[in-house]
Image (cartoon, helix red, strand yellow):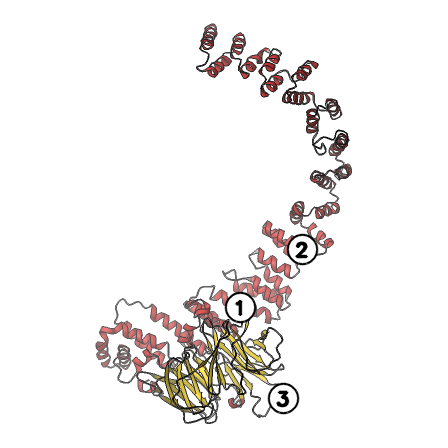
Amino acid sequence: MSSALITADWFRLGQDLYFRKIEIYSMEWDQAIKLENFIVASASYGGPIVIKRDDRKITRVHGTGHPAISIFSASGKAITSFKWTQRPIVHIGWSNDEKLICIQDDGHVVIYDMFGKLDLKFNIFQRVHDAKIVDAKVFTNTKNVTGVAVMTSNFNIFVVNSIKDIKTRQLSTVPKSSVDPTCWSIVSEETSTDVLFAREKELYRLKQDEYHTSTILQPDVTVPYTAILEMCVSLNARHLCFFTDSGYLWLGSTDLRHKYCEVETDTVHKPKQLVWCGNETVVTYWENTHTLLVVGKNGQIHTYLYENSIHLIPEIDGVRIVSNLHHELLQKVPEVVQKIFRINSTEPGSFLLEASKHFQKGSHKANEYITLVKNNLEEALNQCLDAVGYEFNLEVQKMLIRAAQFGKCFIPGMNSQKYVKMCRLLRVLNAIRDPKVGIPLTIEQLKHMNVKEFGGSDENESLKHLLDRLIVRNIYFLALQIAKYLKLPENVGSSYILMHWAKYKVTQSQTEEETVAREIAEKLGYSSGVSYREIAEKASDYGKNKLAIKLLDYEPKASEQVELLLKLHENKSALHKAIESGNTDLIYMVVLKLREKMPLADFKMTIRNFPVAQALYIKYCKEYQKAALREIYIQEDDFPSLALLNIEESLEDTNGLGIDSQLTTALEFYKKARKDLYASMCEENLKLLRFQRELDNKLQLPEKLIGKSVHETCKTLLENKEVKLAEKLRNDFKIPDKRYWYLRIAILAKQNDWSELDKFSKLKKSPVGYGPFVDACWANNNKNEALKYISKVTDELKAKYYLQIECYEEAAEVAFQNRDIQTLRNIQCRLSNKQPELLQKLTLMLNRLDSTN
């Protein structure tokens, strides 16, 4: 294909500013469709087209009077059609993710997927609103977020900046007037959404700031006019164009600070559509004459005439033109394409292309062209690779790829990554542009799909959004092929696609549940990013609970299985899975949720069949629900546990009012369980309790005896000199003699009652010896009293006690008599440099003992 043929449909709108119109498709829809009778809207990025009969025009209608909404692919292939039975539609449009948005006159916004399935419905008015909607617009801001704006019958404007985060805001109002607005347009940037509002000659900018500012604007218009009839804002929100009743188009910046040009159109009729073609030109269409006018920012124009009605769809890099028979793309010729194909071009890419053509013909001129470009071969190759991405024509693509391949041969050691990458991307773009798929996406649009909202410009994310468009259309096989061909990571590639395929399959399939679950598992396996829980949840949403349960068997995460099983009321299965996992927290979660949801009797019978769960529930009840714990023990006839529970409660009884009854109950339970030892212990406790209560009433001591042990009770009585009562307690509760003597000695010494201690020591032979007397006296700083009792201590211990109370000389004498060398040495260490005479005596003693040994 010659360069002249390629550039034949180019037209110029300024120096080095070329535009072209490319035919993308011949429309496949019914030839009876006449666009002049329909309201048409199309999604951006080569999205689907929706048509709805225009109620303002008289046309022949077949069937019922309800209007039909029909959705087609960009190639005119029918996707779906459904009757509209709700309130009248004021405006119809598409979101950036290809959701159909229908705005009704009562403020309701109804959103469908491209197959006509209801996705979302909300009212733009958060409160009851009497005003009727007379006009509306769907817009996508520079952050790729779709919003809606409506105008009411009293000309107030309300905006929802994002249909994914529905918050209605009213814009500022304009001064009241008897004149109706003539047109309005959205200026939607990243952080704000304003409206340009025209009322005849007046032009206002309405804001949604806290001050509700409305600013009247004064555009620099040379030709007098009385009204602005139509206007539009570019997709990047920086440029404005409006059409006046004097027949002129005004182009400038949205803030009106810069005027680009004013252009006469030779008509005063209001255009049907006025849109920006990228950011360079404006495209205007008049239906009465079927005239399409392309106007550059420098004021140059180009005109197209059509036989029938058309519809314009603005894109970030051009305008799509849909007619009854064709679908075309009007765009600025990319700079790199201009460089290669422009007549008499001297760019390296152009020479390389010519060299490749002549090489294909076997002409020696190939060498001449290669010689011309030999110093710029890499630049030439890059130009060919960059240009091929912008081309729709397969012959032109092949021609440029051959040129790049030819150029590669003359660059030693060149990295082929860019070449391979472009070849792969080109195959993908051609596959989705196929009329059977019908997504005429340009390479520029593909790059832009991931801007801002989706987290930057990561290439994998852009390709993921491309795959999303295939997934939305249920074209899973092609999406899977593309993901594998481009070697995308599983989380944005094969696993991601198969997940969506599985969700679609469970909603559509009428096959037996087990077969469907097995087919899905065979396809998906256990790849990363695959969640069988999500697929099962989708099945349950469609009432296919059996299928959901089967799918959960393939879910590797027990927590995911359990949550959905509980939601499906499969309580036993959920509990079984939780126990199988061995995760205590998960078992607790299931048990407690079952306790909340189920009647008590059913709950008890359920967990009774799961010993692990029951044991954990009992442990939980011990901490937080004693009443529930008692019920479990009663149900299980667990008398020992019931008795222990009563004993624990008696210990927690701080005022002592219910201890008797609790211990009596515990006693009865131990008897039923034939635990005689424990029963007798309860009886002893009750006996002690009664004795303590009697003493409390009788003695009125500062500290109550109830709740104390036998030892503590005896100690308290002795401290209060109630010896007879202590003796009675000792006899009744069989306190051992040794314990009683130790206690009595310690208390008398602590009270410094030395005479009573002396009497007690002589009461009878001490069962604990007399060492404790010495210890008690010394502990209470009475050395003399301690000496009295050392004489009664056995000879073997006298030296020890003398040493303890620091009577070193006496200790030495006793130790020498007992031939206790170790004690003598201990005394020697204790004395150190003190008492030299005694130290000398100790040395003699040790020498004598050593010599005799």
Q: Nearer the viewer, residue 732 or 512?
A: 732
From this view, report whether residue 286 is shown above or below residue 95.
Answer: below
Q: Does residue 537 appear to the left or right of 334 in the view shown?
A: right
For the residues marked 1 and 2, what is the alpha-carbon distance in whole angstroms? 32 Å
Front-lying residue, 661 or 35:
661
> In this rendering, would 73 be left or right of 630?
left
**Labels 3 and 2: the sequence-earlier one:** 3
**Which residue is identified by label 2?**
594
Q: Quadrant of residue 787?
A: top right
Q: Secondary structure at mark 2?
A: helix
Mark 1 or mark 2, whichever is nearer to me = 2
Q: CA distance from mark 1 to mark 3?
A: 37 Å
Is disc 1 in contact with disc 3, using a CB cutoff of under 8 Å?
A: no
Residue that label 3 marks: 63
Q: Is residue 97 visible?
A: no
Q: Amino acid at mark 1?
A: His
Give the secondary structure at mark 1: helix
- Label 3 Cα neighbours within 10 Å, binned few <14 / some 14-19 / many ≥20: few
User: If the image is split into quadrants, where does the N terminus sit?
Assistant: bottom left
Q: Earlier in the sequence, mark 1 or mark 3?
A: 3
Disc 3 and disc 2 in contact, CB within 8 angstroms = no
Q: Which mark is residue 635?
A: none
- Percent from the top left, x then y, of residue 223? 39, 90
Q: Residue type at mark 2?
A: Leu
Task: Give how far apart the Cα atoms at labels 3 and 2 are.
Answer: 54 Å
Disc number at residue 500?
1
